[in-house]
Amino acid sequence: MATGTDQVVGLGLVAVSLIIFIYYTAWVILLPFIDSQHVIHKYFLPRAYAVAIPLAAGLLLLLFVGVFITYVMLKNQKGTKKAQ
Amino acid sequence: MRERDGGSVTITNLSSKAVKAFLDYAYTGETQITDDNVEMFFQLSSFLQWLWGLALLGSTWAALTTGALGLELPSPCREVLWPLPAYLLVSAGYYALGTVGYCVATFHDCEDAARELQSQVQEACADLARRGMRF
């Protein structure tokens, strides 16, 4: 069995994914069927954000990956230039 | 661009006979399947099946969301329908995250074997250093 920080990190990731699953499923699938006067609607943002937030997060992720790749490539280039 | 300036394009990884067989089928409805092209046909057919399924689901969703079919769906159903592609993408995301987390948490560490291996490596390094090898 994995030990120490491995287990903590792993279980943390599982917990985060479960929370996202429950919240997002409730937001997209359950909320339209609940009466609009119910108090639970207070805990959820307006429906348009259900698409906007994942889209923005995806774009941010792509941006981060692109910046990371650029950074690594520049570092490698500088390294070989110095060697020459 | 190299292809535009060079005047010719070379497509690798596909036998010309296989591409010819596929084009024959597309234009005449008949083709010869040989040892050469059978594997390429398998790959191509599974890719096209996947693409077809995706196109079918996508067009169904688009037709239902834009009301092109003239069906009067109840309002809650329509509210659930339009964010569905985003929902599927996000669900793929958290499923991947959960799987990775679960595998990290249940990874089988062999601590004793690792320690033993480390000590053996140390022994070998010490032995080689004694014989004059420098690291």
Image: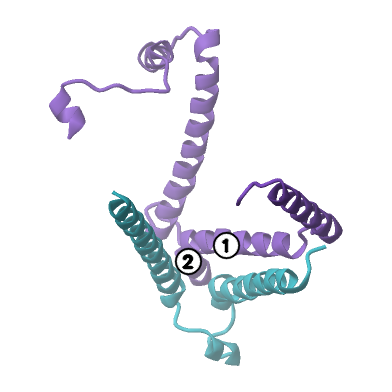
Q: Nearer the viewer, mark 2 or mark 1?
A: 1
Please, is residue A45 above or below residue A81 in the view?
A: below
Q: Are marks 2 and 1 on the same chain?
A: yes
Q: CA distance from mark 2 to mark 1?
A: 20 Å
Residue under numbered circle 2: B78
Q: Name the residue beneath numbered marker 1.
A: B91
B75 left or right, relative to B24:
right
Disc with the residue nearer the chain's start (2 vs 1): 2
Horizontally, residue A29 falls left or right of residue B10, namely right
Q: Colour of chain A?
A: cyan
Q: Which residue is rendered at x = 45% and y = 77% of the image?
A: A47
* In-front residue for pair B123/B22: B123
Q: Where is residue A28 shown, x and y percent of the image?
A: 54, 71
Chain identifier of the purple chain:
B
Query: Could you say which is closer to the camera, residue A82 or residue B133?
Result: B133
Q: Amino acid at mark 2?
A: Arg
- SS at mark 2? helix
Indicate the quadrant where residue A11 lies.
Answer: bottom right
Which residue is located at x 63 percent, y 74 percent? A16
The x and y percentages for residue B1 are 17, 35
Taking the image as shown, residue A73 lies to the left or right of residue B73, namely: left
